[in-house]
Image: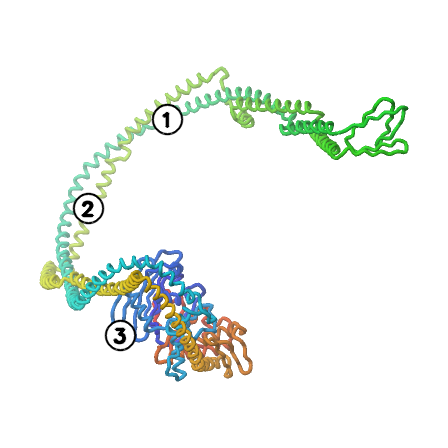
């Protein structure tokens, strides 16, 4: 494949990029900063070749610019095999595809037809696995390429090894054999589940009878459909030659019509130029007449203006006298209005002062009442803060504690026993830690806990039992809880706590009432605001203490009425003067004087223009020019009439529509033939299925026998598949041994420039590099440094490209290297540059890099910045 041209629009970060007239061989270095679109060139080629224009997949959406709603457009021109073509695709917004076949037989295709044609070219002439391998994308440094997965390479290696047999074992044949083998056996060679289930299919066929019945019902309709499709296809085939012949005729007619249209456009241009020249000549003639008329009109206007000026002078004098009298009257009215306004201002100040005096007295009274309420609130809140707060929860807790004690005491009394002690003679005994005196009267001692008695030398220990002891322990616990609660609440009993709670409730109610009274009295205004208002009220000096607000309002109204009368008088005087403010008569006189000067100047200008025109050309010359242009226009008009007649007869628009119609007719017949053929193939399959179902339906026993025969057939196929698979694997292994040597030799020859003359490689069964040897030292591929692996990745691709190019069956394929050699030292960089130069002698090598200096030792066909490709057309 040879790439001739790449044009990209709106692809990721690329707004527009052009790469034209690319040489058939050589190294092309494209450099630029990161994220400028270098890798996008490689991705764009992959997109235009492999993704259809109507696709809306995630891959297409991912390459759309993030900040612009614009269509993605890619144009790609290349030669693959003996076919040179130009494909243009537009994605997402108004998707379109256009294919232009340039060689060997030119043709044009659009839409899905263009996609089909492109796919056919790629399938027929291009090994896509080879193309994908030689397009080394950014970050792909794997040197272990599966070479046997590239049909073009294995074919080339077969040729290199001198074998006349087809050694491309990983093509469709090997895939078909492995697929057939996998139907019967697992990877370990044992029978798989499918093979073991054929006997079960005998039973399953009975369930298939219902399905077969439905298929039989459809069989008749499929047969009728086949007959109709065959008839439609035959009719289309019969009409297609005539339609193609008509298309050639229409194209010929269109070419002739377009030629006449071009001639007509030239004659129309001549007619336009002749008309324009005549118009200019007549215009010059008319302008000369207009100049003479303009001169006479200007002289007449000067005479009329001089006569009118004398009348305007008298009007201006009368106007000046009247204006002066009215101005004096207006000034007197303004003085009277100013005095009235001053009186209104004084009266308003008196009204405001009286209002402030009354408001100040009201605020003093109000603040005294608010201070009284504030004092009460302060006293209540002080008492509230000094008392220990009591809540309803506290009352409930104390009541519960008292109840618990009473209950436990009742339980203790109910569960405990008693000991009754008495003595004939007074006796003293030790009871626990206390001494107890006994007499003839009985003394009861409660048994609610362990009790020890000492009587003389006898010690008696009494255990009252677990129930009584537990009750006593529970009583002591609730009594401790009650004591702790009373101590925390600082009360002696429940009555004292209730009394404190009631006092607290009354205090809270009094505070709430005083707050409402405070709110009502102040009207919701803060006391500080009221005090500030009181302090801010001002009373003017000299205010009459006996003058009330009503009297002050009356004085203000009288002053305002006086101001209104003075204002009305001023308005009347101003209105009388308004008509004369603009001094219309004086202005009219000034305008007329200026007009008279302008008219006199017009006379001079008109005379000068006429004199210049006569000096440039005489009246006879102007008349002759008009006649000459008239004759030329008449001659061109005859040509125009003739060509318009020819144009009407040829009718290019109609010829274009007829040609488009003929092309659509041909496409329609071709589409009808293709669609009918496709549908016939589908129907034939359905008919075959339906016929099988009919046989199973009519002969159930025969179907069962057929299933048994099928099992026997599958067993024979399995045996054959095993023998064929074993044979193919043996053949493949022998083939790989034969053509592994040429591939290893090619790798060693190229590696000599980079690693030294004693470099050898071991290849695995897929022809991937397993290890590298330099002299006696061998290192596995995975243990090589990152730089060495990257160099081997490039070296392997150059080896594949050379082997394929040397084969007569496959032309050279371009190599793309995207942002490589970043881990290569300067010495190796110099050596590997020789491989780039050698590769460029036989094929196209595209290098995409952000560090162009790495390739200074490479013999490049061109070194270009990505920015230059995005800003202008570049010829390589």
Disc 1 and disc 3: Cα gap in Å? 107 Å
- The picture quadrant where one finds residue 44 is bottom left
Q: Secondary structure at mark 2?
A: helix
Q: Point out the tag, 3 or 2, that comes first from the N-terminus.
A: 3
Q: Which residue is mark 3?
A: 104
- Asked which colour scheme the image uses, the reply is rainbow
- Judged by depth in the image, the label closer to the viewer, 1 or 3, is 3
**SS of the residue at dot 1?**
helix
Residue 74, percent across and down? 34, 64
Q: Nearer the viewer, residue 147 or 15?
A: 147
- Tell which of 323 and 510 is nearer to you: 510
Q: Examine the rendered structure and indicate whether residue 713 appears above or below residue 611.
A: below
Of the 4 image quadrants, the one containing the N terminus is bottom left
Give me the residue at 17% from left, 57% from top.
612
Secondary element type, mark 3: loop
Quadrant the C terminus occupies? bottom left
Q: Position of residue 654 (x, y in %)?
A: 15, 61
* Residue under pointer 1: 335
Which numbered disc covers residue 595? none
From the viewer's perspective, tell me whether residue 870 is left or right of residue 395.
left
* 1 or 3: tag closer to the N-terminus: 3
């Amino acid at each position: 494949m040879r790439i001739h041209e790449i044009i990209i629009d709106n692809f990721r970060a690329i707004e527009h990029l052009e790469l034209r007239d690319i040489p058939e061989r050589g190294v092309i270095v494209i450099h630029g900063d990161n994220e400028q679109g270098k890798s996008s060139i490689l991705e764009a080629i992959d997109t235009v070749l492999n993704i259809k224009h109507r696709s809306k997949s995630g891959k297409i959406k991912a390459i759309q610019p993030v900040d612009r709603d614009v269509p993605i457009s890619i144009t790609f021109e290349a030669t693959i095999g003996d076919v040179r073509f130009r494909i243009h695709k537009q994605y997402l917004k108004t998707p379109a595809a256009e294919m232009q076949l340039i060689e060997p037989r030119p043709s044009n295709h659009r839409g899905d037809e263009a996609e089909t044609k492109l796919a056919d070219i790629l399938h027929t002439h291009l090994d896509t696995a080879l193309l994908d391998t030689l397009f080394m994308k950014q970050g792909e440094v794997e040197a272990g390429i599966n070479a046997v997965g590239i049909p073009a390479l294995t074919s080339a290696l077969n040729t290199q090894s001198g074998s006349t047999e087809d050694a491309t074992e990983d093509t469709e044949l090997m895939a078909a054999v492995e697929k057939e083998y996998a139907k019967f056996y697992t990877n370990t060679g044992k029978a798989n589940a499918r093979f073991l289930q054929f006997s079960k299919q005998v039973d399953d066929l009975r369930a298939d009878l219902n399905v077969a019945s439905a298929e039989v019902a459809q069989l008749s309709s499929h047969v009728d459909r086949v007959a109709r499709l065959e008839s439609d296809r035959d009719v289309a085939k019969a009409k297609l030659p005539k339609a193609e012949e008509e298309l050639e005729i229409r194209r010929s007619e269109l070419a002739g019509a377009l030629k006449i249209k071009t001639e007509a456009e030239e004659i129309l241009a001549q007619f336009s130029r002749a008309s324009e020249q005549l118009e200019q000549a007549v215009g010059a003639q008319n302008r000369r007449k207009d100049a003479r008329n303009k001169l006479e009109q200007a002289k007449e206007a000067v005479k009329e203006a001089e006569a009118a000026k004398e009348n305007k002078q008298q009007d201006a004098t009368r106007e000046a006298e009247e204006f002066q009298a009215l101005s004096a009257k207006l000034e007197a009215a303004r003085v009277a209005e100013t005095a009235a306004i001053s009186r209104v201002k004084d009266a308003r100040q008196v009204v405001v002062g009286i209002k402030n005096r009354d408001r100040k007295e009201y605020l003093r009274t109000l603040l005294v009442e608010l201070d009284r309420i504030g004092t009460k609130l302060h006293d209540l809140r002080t008492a509230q803060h000094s008392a220990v707060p009591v809540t309803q929860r506290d009352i409930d807790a104390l009541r519960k504690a008292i109840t618990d004690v009473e209950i436990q005491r009742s339980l203790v009394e109910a569960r405990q026993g008693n000991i009754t002690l008495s003595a004939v003679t007074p006796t003293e005994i030790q009871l626990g830690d206390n001494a107890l005196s006994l007499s003839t009267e009985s003394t009861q001692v409660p048994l609610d806990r362990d009790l020890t008695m000492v009587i003389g030398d006898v010690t008696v220990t009494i255990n009252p039992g677990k129930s009584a002891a537990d009750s006593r322990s529970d009583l002591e616990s609730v009594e401790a809880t009650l004591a702790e609660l009373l101590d925390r609440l600082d009360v002696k009993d429940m009555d004292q706590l209730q009394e404190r709670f009631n006092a607290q409730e009354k205090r809270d109610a009094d505070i709430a009432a005083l707050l409402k009274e405070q709110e009502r009295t102040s009207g919701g205004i803060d006391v500080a605001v009221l005090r500030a208002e009181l302090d801010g009220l001002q009373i003017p000096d000299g205010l009459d203490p006996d003058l009330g607000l009503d009297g002050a309002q009356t004085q203000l109204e009288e002053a305002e009425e006086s101001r209104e009368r003075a204002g009305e008088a001023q308005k009347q005087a101003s209105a009388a003067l308004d008509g004369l403010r603009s001094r219309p008569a004086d202005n009219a006189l000034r305008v007329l004087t200026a007009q008279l000067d302008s008219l006199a100047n017009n006379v001079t200008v008109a005379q000068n223009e006429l004199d210049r025109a006569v000096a440039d050309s005489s009246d006879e010359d102007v008349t002759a020019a008009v006649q000459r242009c008239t004759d030329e226009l008449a001659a061109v008009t005859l040509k125009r009439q003739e060509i318009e007649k020819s144009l009407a007869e040829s009718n290019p628009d109609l010829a274009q529509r007829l040609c488009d119609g003929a092309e659509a007719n041909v496409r329609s017949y071709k589409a009808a033939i293709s669609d009918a053929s496709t549908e016939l193939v589908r129907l034939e399959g359905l008919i075959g299925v339906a016929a099988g179902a009919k046989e199973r339906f009519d002969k159930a026993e025969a179907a069962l026998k057929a299933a048994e025969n099928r099992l026997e057939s599958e067993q024979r196929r399995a045996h054959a598949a095993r023998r064929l698979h074993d044979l193919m694997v043996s053949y493949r292994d022998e083939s790989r041994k034969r053509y592994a040597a040429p591939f290893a030799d090619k790798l060693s020859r190229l590696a000599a420039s980079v690693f030294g003359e004693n470099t050898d490689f071991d290849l695995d069964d897929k022809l991937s590099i397993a290890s590298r040897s330099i002299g006696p030292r061998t290192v596995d591929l995975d243990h090589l440094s990152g730089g060495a692996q990257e160099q081997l990745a490039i070296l392997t691709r150059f080896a594949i490209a050379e082997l394929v190019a040397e084969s007569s069956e496959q032309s050279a394929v371009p190599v793309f290297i995207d942002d490589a050699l970043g881990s290569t030292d300067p010495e190796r960089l110099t050596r590997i540059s020789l491989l780039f130069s050698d590769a460029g002698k036989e094929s196209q090598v595209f290098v995409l890099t952000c560090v162009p200096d790495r390739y200074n030792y490479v013999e490049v066909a061109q070194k270009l910045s990505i920015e230059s490709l995005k800003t202008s057309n570049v010829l390589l």
